[in-house]
Image: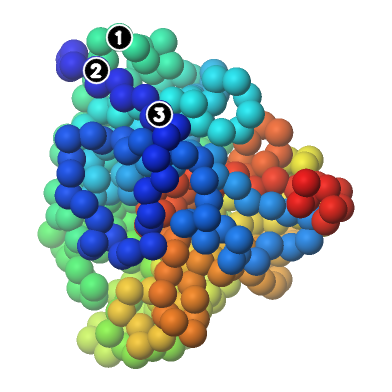
Amino acid sequence: MKISFLRITMALAVVISLNSCKEDKKENKDSAVKEMELDSTDLALLDLNLPEGFKIEVYARGVDGARSMAMGDNGTLFVGTRTENNVYAIQDTDGDFKADNIIVLDTMEVPNGIAMRNGDLYVAQVGSLWKYPNIEEQIGGELEKELIYDDFPTEFHHGWKYIAFGPDDKLYVPVGAPCNICNRTDEDERFATISRMDPDGSNREIYARGIRNSVGFTWHPDTKQMWFTDNGRDMLGDDIPPCELNTVTEAGQHFGYPFCHGGIVKDPEFGDLRPCSDFVDPALQLDAHVAPLGIKFYTGTMFPAAYKGKAFIAEHGSWNRSKKVGYRIMMVDIQDGEAISTKPFIDGWLDEVAQKATGRPVDILMLKDGSMLISDDFGDAIYRVSYSETAVANNQ
């Protein structure tokens, strides 16, 4: 199938304030990418807290609703969105770690999930999956794509996808629960699961069950075991149940939803049907309502040696808690397959006194030089985190 290719280049000209809430933004859709400088003052990056020697800078701006990220072999960053319905291609042509071109690659409904394999870009909508062969060779010309499947559940509640290829060259695709709390696996056994399949969509199987809404997973660089985040249910109060970090040690495991939450909270409606002891306990209980999304292990060499092998989690932040929580990047120490401890790596996107957020991190991606990219669907930006040997060098 061929469709018209829309190329829009970001001109570095006008700074646009993002201090107001998303709802206050102009609804002008005529220009998909706004003209703005790579300035960080209105994104409040100076208010963020990072360990000594680290700095965070703007990599790209005007990426409305930036969420899932995948890197092409030739250095093009592809970014999916949820409500903005755009797939972006972002190019840093001069290697200065600042975007030169931001291109709306395609427009489609809820293209949240994206993944790269052998030069091909995969984009997942709620119920379908598309492949763009040799995508970086297509940029600047007619856009060609192939339908892989269109028979996944179409419920929008927790229906947006995070997808990734595993070490087994299988594509992993989640289907969230179509509700806050329900048990609808009798209607479709794929609800509240993560499935895997061959790159052409064949040989599908359910890999893990009892997962309310995972919007981020990765594989340990040594053990190759999957680690995934899961968003806990709502409407049980401010402090329960915990959100979860989980690891899959064998295919077919069940992680508790909707019967048990966080390994400890019996669901008021479904908890009497099966006890918590029936299910795999979380590797780590995260704070309630922090909305953990993207997760990646650090395998680079730029950061100090102590960061090697640590897992980083993007906490998108709460939406219905009386006092907001999350809005940060957490770092998890994992040893011998067990999560030992966790602490903030970057926080400050939430002003806890004013209860106002300036950013909501979504996904994490490591660049070849060892630096880290973070997508922010509230600030409409991609950030780059790097490390310098000293605080003096960091501020130069």
Q: On the image, which quarter does residue 231 sit in?
A: bottom left
Q: Quadrant of the N terminus?
A: top left
SS for callout 2: loop
State the CA–CA distance, disc 1 to disc 3.
Answer: 21 Å
User: Disc 3 designates what residue?
Assistant: 11
Residue in view at x 83 percent, y 56 percent: 391
285 is higher (above) or lower (below) than 159: below
Label placed on residue 141 = 1
Q: Amino acid at mark 1?
A: Gly
Q: On the image, which quarter does residue 224 sit in?
A: top right
Please give left or right for residue 386 compared with residue 94 in the image: right
Label placed on residue 218 = none
User: What color scheme is it?
Assistant: rainbow
SS for callout 3: loop
Q: Pointer 1 and pointer 3: residues touching (CB < 8 Å)?
A: no
Q: Where is residue 329 drawn, in percent x and y?
A: 57, 62
Q: Where is residue 351 drawn, in percent x and y?
A: 49, 76
Circle 2 residues within 10 Å: few <14, some 14–19, many ≥20: some
Judge depth for marks 1 and 3 and give the one in front.
3
Residue in view at x 38 percent, y 54 percent: 17
Judge depth for marks 2 and 3 and give the one in front.
3
Residue in view at x 18 percent, y 44 percent: 28
Could you tell which of marks 2 and 3 lies nearer the N-terminus?
Answer: 2
Label placed on residue 5 = 2
Q: Pointer 2 and pointer 1: residues touching (CB < 8 Å)?
A: yes
Please give left or right for residue 50 compared with residue 269 in the image: right
Residue 366 or 20: which is nearer the viewer? 20
Q: Amino acid at mark 2?
A: Phe
Residue 209 in view (yes/no):
no
State the CA–CA distance, disc 2 to disc 3.
Answer: 19 Å
Q: Where is residue 255 drawn, in percent x and y?
A: 42, 68
SS for callout 1: loop
